Structures are given as C-alpha cells and as structure tokens.
Image (cartoon, grey):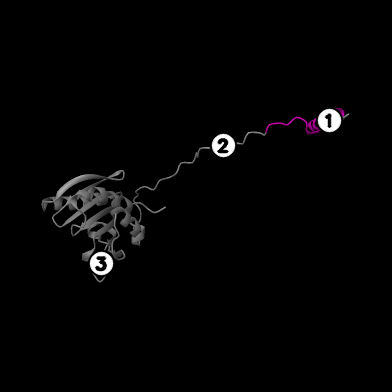
Amino acid sequence: MRGNLIFVALGAVALSVCAACAEAGPQTAAPPPQIPKITPQTTPTKAPVMVDRPLPDDCDLVVPADVMNATLGQELPGEPRIIIGIKEPGIGRTGKIDCYYGIPEKRNLPDAKIVIGLSTYTDEATAKTRVAESVDAERTDGAKITEVDVGKQKGTLIEGKDEQLLIGSLGKSTFVVRNRNNFLPADRLTAVLPVLAERSMTPPV
C-alpha cells in the first residue's frame, strides 16, 4: 500500500507541472536592442578666417588676453591697452589702432611685451605700398627680412636689433605684430608672431 501511495503522489506532481507548461505556452525571444542610426552632418562648419574687416574698437576683438597668454605659454601682466590713432589722408590712412599687451603695474606703453597694430587705407594698393615701404626701410637699417606664412596669407618677419615684427596686408588693411624689448627669443618668433597676426585679422565667431 505504501508503494502505491508514493506512485500516486508522484503522478500528481507530474500532472501539475505539465499543466503549468500548458498555461505558459511557447516563449518568444526578446527583440535585439535597437542600434541608433548615426547620420553624418551634411552642413559644413565654417571655420573663422582672416578677412579685411573694419577696425575693432577693443583689444578683446583683436587678440583676447586669454588667447594671447595661451599662444605665448605664459600669463602676461596687466590688462591690454588700446590707442586709437588718427586718420592721415596724406598717406591714404583711414584709421589705426594699437593694442599693448604685458604692461607691468605702474609702467607705461613702452614697457609692453607685445604690440599689435591694425590700420586701414583708402585702397588695397595703398596698403601694400605702406607695407613695402616699411620693409624697405627696415632692410636699409640692416634688419633680417624673411617671408612667412600667416594663415593663408603671406607676411614679412623683420628682425631688427631691438625689435622684431611681423608685417603684412590683406585688402585695404595692414597688420603688424611687434616683439618688444626682445621679449620672445629668436627661435620662437616664427611660432608665435604669425599666430597672433592671423588672429588679429580674424573676427570672433
């Protein structure tokens, strides 16, 4: 009798398991995760470039102090100072500004480390003539003259005894970046001055 009872119990368990299987029914596999489709950007990003632009009225619109420091790899003292020049019809100049960077506290403009000057002229030919005349005068004084790239433009690096400068023109405008009091060593001039010159003629975005 005891063996029969065990058999019946096992049979009941088997039936209940099969009933549960019937109720659950076949299980379907979960769908694979959706992979997001990445669509390449079709609109080109316009990179800022040098342009013949109107003269800025603030040194932050020429070369901001933080960009100057990053380019030099050091922080210059003081705040940039701007000097707005006058028009000179006799030489065809219609406007001029100079930005002085790195003036120590309680010191004056001659103590600046870097000076960036922008000028505008009546036409492109006059701007080119002014640059050529400046280069010729420096060459006559014994300065070393080298053509360098400034963005997609060309500029002239002038290495004099007490000052080194990069000068060039774009349209009706001219630019000049001066290394004052031999602040930058000679081996860094071509790495720094063209970058500053390009930025000075590039409007902020």
* Residue drawn at the location 84% of the way across and 30% of the way down: 6
* Residue drawn at the location 21% of the way across and 65% of the way down: 111
In the picture, measured across the screen, residue 36 lies left or right of residue 55, that is: right
The secondary structure that dominates the magenta segment is: helix
Q: What separation in Å lies between label 2 and label 1 (alpha carbons)?
A: 61 Å
Q: Position of residue 73 (x, y in %)?
A: 29, 54
Magenta-drawn segment = 2-29
The residue labelled by disc 2 is: 37
- Looking at the image, the residue that sits furthest to the front is 1
**Residue 178, can we see it?**
yes
The amino acid on which the numbered mark 1 sits, given as a three-letter code, is Ile
Whether residues under marks 2 and 1 lie with C-beta atoms below 8 angstroms apart, the answer is: no
- Looking at the image, the residue that sits furthest to the right is 1
Q: Of label 2 and label 1, which has the lower sequence position?
A: 1
The residue labelled by disc 1 is: 6
Quarter assignment of residue 108: bottom left
The residue labelled by disc 3 is: 104
Q: Position of residue 30 (x, y in %)?
A: 67, 34
The amino acid on which the numbered mark 3 sits, given as a three-letter code, is Pro
* Residue drawn at the location 51% of the way across and 37% of the way down: 40
